[in-house]
Image (cartoon, rainbow, N blue to C red):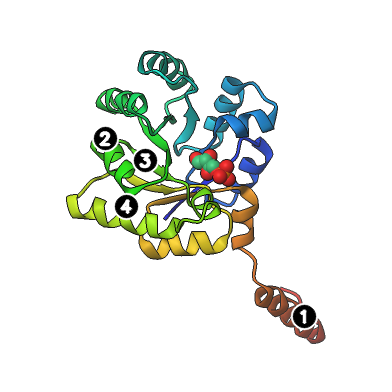
Amino acid sequence: MKFFADTAEIADIQELAATGLLDGVTTNPSLIAKSGRDFKEVTREICALTTGPVSAEVVALDHETMMKEAEILRKIADNVCIKVPLTIDGLKTCKALTSDGTMVNVTLCFSAAQALLAAKAGATFVSPFVGRHDDNGFDGMQLISDIRLIYDNYGYETEILVASVRHGIHVLEAAKIGADVMTAPPSVIKGLFKHILTEKGIEGFLADWAKTGQSI
Ligand code: E4P
């Protein structure tokens, strides 16, 4: 499963990229606002930190303006992936851009039927938001299973990008279902490395090693 960082914070992306385990980055207008940075400038910097896709979201609601915004965004770097909302205009834009070889991430997906439409529109990625789904009393992981089944039934190549990930269990369940990608805040990704028994194990081994008086 590919790991994307869901952030526009350069220092966090640099830290994760240094592990060699980062496959891409996703941003959204809220994350750009939180960073306090200029959208195009920060997107350019992020694109230089990974060879993987970097999602940059359009903010227009109509197809024509979405296409204009996408044209500006895709010129930033070769690895920019245009993010469009799951609306009729968003999917029209998706179809036009992917037909032209541009990567597209269809975001704000909350139903399997919507994910089917995104695949039919040729989306490179579809982003079902599991955390927000759970927050509203739905079963986010059931949504991922349903999309996996539908895509496998028809051999759709659109990658399932599990988004709105809140904790390690989301990551684990997404991997068990066979999602292609997950995007999570850096704190969630860093949390995956940790286990109390790993820490205790290191502590015990180092204490015993000290008793040997040796060095490597
Ligand atoms: C996905 O691309 C979105 O940026 C993101 O996962 C939204 O997550 P949130 O529900 O934590 O805002």
Distance (Cα) linking label 1 and label 4: 55 Å
At mark 4, the secondary structure is helix
Q: Disc 1 to disc 3, how far (Cα)?
A: 52 Å
Task: Tell me which numbered mark, 1 or 3, is placed earlier along the sequence.
Answer: 3
* Label 1, residues with CA under 10 Å away: few <14, some 14-19, many ≥20: few
Query: Which mark is first along the chain, 3 or 4?
Result: 3
Q: Which residue is mark 2?
A: 122
Q: Work out how far the residue at label 4 is from the one at label 2, CA to CA, in angstroms.
A: 15 Å
Q: Is residue 97 above or below residue 141?
A: above
Secondary element at image label 3: strand
| Residue under numbered circle 4 | 147
Disc on the earlier residue, 4 or 2: 2
Q: CA distance from mark 3 to mark 2?
A: 9 Å
| Residue 214, label in figure | 1
Mark 3–mark 2 contact, CB under 8 Å? no
Q: Quadrant of residue 61?
A: top left
User: Seen in the image, is 113 located left or right of residue 181?
Assistant: left
Judged from the image, the secondary structure of the residue bearing numbered disc 2 is loop
59 up-or-down from 151: above or below: above
Q: Nearer the viewer, mark 4 or mark 3?
A: 4
Q: Residue sitting at 50 percent across and 59 percent down?
A: 171
Amino acid on which disc 3 is placed: Phe
Can you give x and y, in whole percent of width and height, for residue 31 in the image?
61, 34
Left/right of residue 70 with respect to residue 198 in the rendered view = left
Which residue is disc 3 drawn over? 125
Residue type (three-letter) at the residue carrying disc 1: Gln
Q: Earlier in the sequence, mark 1 or mark 4?
A: 4
